[in-house]
Every structure is written in structure tokens, then in C-alpha cells.
């Protein structure tokens, strides 16, 4: 897997100060995407052990609230294969940090569609606290929305959704400082 960028600290892609990993590779190709350069799976730098180590060290800082995965598309199958062992390490070494992910896929496709056949998908979801799902829709763009770009996207409490078997949305006001 390649990654396009690491932002540390990042205050735009989730609550508080975060470490954000922008992975490379996306097949959605949403018109109006803010990060088209990351559509190419070969763009950026290889995600290496050194990259993992750097991210973990940044996440250990007491003022960092968590990790955000975006891109590109973290849930492209080839990206999942690399992200799964990394997320296991994050949960082991910095378990008190939240994990957010942004995806053009919707959670229903992850749980019941073709993605459920990929063994990594459900395990990755089991480690994510919040998922902002759905493709960016330029015609639904709304700059007043927190943590998303268009009104079709949802901010989902993944753990409650998995527990209840129904979509549970996150009240983003709970993250106000």
C-alpha cells in the first residue's frame, strides 16, 4: 500500500488533535473530490514499518485524541490488507485513542454486500469507532456539515451499529470541546 500524506496534528478530520493517514488508491472517482491525486494506487510513498513506527509514536502524544484513516479509500481491498495489521498494532499499543475512517463505501456494503466476502472488512470495522460513509456527491456538497462534505454521507458509531444490528448515527455535538 502507498500513502499520500500523513497530517500530524490534524484538526479537520475528526474531533480534537489527530493523526491522519491519507492512503493512496480509490476506485470511486467522485466528481468534485478534494483529493483526486490519491485515486492512483501508486501515488505517494510506500507504507513501511518505519511509517507505522512514526505513526504510533505520534499517537502516543497525550494531546492526540486519535487516528483518522482517509484517502484515497481505506476500504479498497488491497488497502485493507495493509491497514488491518497496522490497526491491530494501534489497538495494542495506544488502545485509548479513537479511530475514525472515511469511506466512499457505505456500511451496508461492508457488512452485507460484496465486501463482506473480504475477511479484513469486518475485522477492521471491529476496531473503528466512527465511520463517515458514502461517496462525496458534488450536487449535495454542504460546507456547514461537520466532518463530511456532502449531505448524503453519514457519521456512524460503528461499535453501536455492530452491537445493535442497525445503523447508529453519531451526534457530532458530543465532540465539542
Image (cartoon, rainbow, N blue to C red):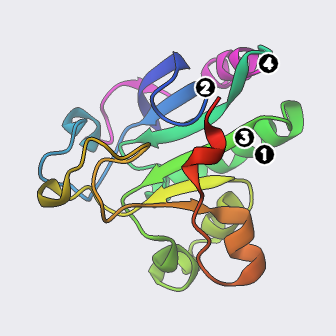
Point out which mark residue 18 bears. 2
The answer to whether residue 173 is above or below residue 11 is: below
The quadrant in which residue 121 appears is: bottom right
Q: CA distance from mark 2 to mark 1?
A: 18 Å
Q: Which residue is mark 4?
A: 60
- Describe the element under mark 2 as helix, strand or loop: strand
Q: CA distance from mark 2 to mark 3?
A: 9 Å
Query: Which mark is nearer the camera, 3 or 4?
Result: 3
- Describe the element under mark 1 as helix, strand or loop: helix
Q: Is residue 49 magenta?
A: yes
Query: Which mark is nearer the camera, 4 or 1?
Result: 4
Camera-nearest residue between 152 and 45: 152
Q: Which residue is mark 3?
A: 98
* Residue at screen point 59% across, 34% down: 15
Camera-nearest residue between 115 and 131: 131
Q: CA distance from mark 4 to mark 1?
A: 15 Å
Quadrant position of the C terminus in the picture: top right
Q: Which x, y percent locates residue 73?
A: 40, 50
Q: Which x, y percent locates residue 16?
A: 62, 26
**Span of residues in magenta:** 40-60
Q: CA distance from mark 3 to mark 1?
A: 13 Å
Amino acid at each position: 500500500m502507498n500513502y499520500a500524506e500523513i497530517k500530524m496534528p490534524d484538526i479537520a478530520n475528526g474531533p480534537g488533535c489527530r493523526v491522519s493517514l491519507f492512503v493512496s488508491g480509490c476506485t470511486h472517482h467522485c466528481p468534485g473530490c478534494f483529493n483526486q491525486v490519491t485515486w492512483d494506487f501508486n501515488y505517494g510513498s510506500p507504507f513501511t514499518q518505519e511509517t507505522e513506527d512514526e505513526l504510533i509514536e505520534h499517537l502516543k502524544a497525550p494531546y492526540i485524541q486519535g487516528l483518522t484513516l482517509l484517502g484515497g479509500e481505506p476500504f479498497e481491498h488491497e488497502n485493507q490488507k495493509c491497514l488491518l495489521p497496522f490497526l491491530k498494532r494501534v489497538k495494542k499499543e495506544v488502545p485509548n485513542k479513537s479511530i475514525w475512517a472515511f469511506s466512499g463505501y457505505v456500511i451496508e456494503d461492508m457488512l452485507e454486500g460484496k465486501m463482506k466476502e473480504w475477511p479484513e472488512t469486518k475485522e477492521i470495522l471491529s476496531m473503528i469507532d466512527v465511520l463517515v460513509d458514502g461517496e462525496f456527491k458534488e450536487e449535495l456538497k454542504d460546507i456547514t456539515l461537520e466532518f463530511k462534505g456532502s449531505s448524503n454521507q453519514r457519521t456512524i458509531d460503528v461499535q453501536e451499529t455492530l452491537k445493535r444490528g442497525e445503523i447508529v448515527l453519531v451526534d457530532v455535538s458530543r465532540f465539542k470541546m
